[in-house]
């Protein structure tokens, strides 16, 4: 016998999922504000809960605690970076661009644009007030980024090729930090241009 699900049950499930997703999103947005204002150590769960309009129980249900909430924000931030970079590169390819360095620079500029827009959050991640284990996750993400850049640049698989991509990736990473710390968009743009010049010299 096949049990049929009523339309009411389907709608109820969809509403419940939507409400759960909205609660999670509100908690992330509130936590981002609190971390940007106070850093990780001085951020309080009560401030996050108050700003989100949720409850302590909901926060622990969705994230488990302050550390997990911080890491969820980091993951969300990195995923959006990757999505925007991939979209920018895909758009350039569709327009006929096929030079690896040009495509790399397109992706890098997208990365820098997002970093500048969310520079307050980037500063939270780079200024050292982070939970235990965060640097390990950052390094793991960095290694994956090197792998992706190696594919994009069509780098050789020998030691020199691998090291070149690693250095270029480090340049972009450090330039991103400088963009976030820049006092003006003009200063940030100067950093972006300098990073493009350095990258170009390395792949010549």
Image: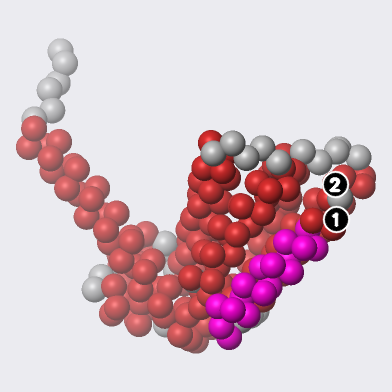
Task: Tell me the crowding category of disc 2: few under 14, some 14 to 19, or many 20 or more residues within 10 angstroms, Cα based.
Answer: some
* Residue linked to disc 2: 162
Question: What residue is rendered at 51% in x and 52% in y?
Answer: 84
Give whichever of discs 2 and 1 has the lower sequence position: 2
Q: For numbered disc 1, what is the local secondary structure?
A: helix
- Reply above or below: 123 against 105: below
Numbered range of the magenta stretch: 183-199
Of badges 2 and 1, nearer the viewer stands 1
Q: Position of residue 103 (x, y in %)?
A: 65, 46
Q: Does residue 101 show up?
A: yes
- Reply above or below: 115 against 161: below
Q: Position of residue 69 (x, y in %)?
A: 46, 66
* Residue linked to disc 1: 202
Residue 42 belongs to the span the image colors magenta: no
Q: Nearer the viewer, residue 103 or 72?
A: 103
Q: For numbered disc 2, what is the local secondary structure?
A: helix
Q: Is residue 85 left or right of residue 160?
A: left
Question: What residue is rendered at 29% in x and 78% in y?
Answer: 51
Residue 195 belongs to the span the image colors magenta: yes
């Amino acid at each position: 016998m096949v049990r049929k699900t009523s339309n009411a049950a389907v709608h109820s499930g969809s509403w419940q999922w939507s409400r759960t997703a909205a609660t999670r999103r509100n908690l992330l947005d509130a936590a981002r504000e609190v971390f940007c204002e106070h850093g990780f150590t001085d951020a309080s769960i009560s401030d996050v809960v108050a700003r989100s309009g949720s409850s302590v129980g909901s926060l622990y249900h969705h994230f488990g605690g302050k550390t997990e909430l911080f890491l969820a924000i980091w993951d969300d931030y990195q995923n959006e970076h990757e999505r925007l970079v991939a979209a920018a590169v895909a758009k350039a390819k569709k327009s006929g661009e096929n030079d690896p360095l040009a495509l790399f620079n397109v992706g890098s500029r997208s990365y820098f644009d997002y970093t500048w827009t969310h520079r307050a959050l980037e500063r939270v991640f780079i200024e050292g007030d982070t939970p235990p284990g965060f640097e390990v996750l950052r390094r793991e993400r960095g290694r994956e980024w090197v792998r992706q850049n190696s594919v994009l640049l069509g780098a050789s698989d020998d030691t020199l090729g691998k090291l070149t991509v690693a250095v270029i990736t480090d340049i972009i990473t450090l330039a991103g930090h400088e963009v976030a710390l820049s006092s003006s968009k003009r200063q940030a743009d100067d950093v972006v241009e300098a990073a493009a010049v350095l990258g170009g010299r390395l792949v010549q």
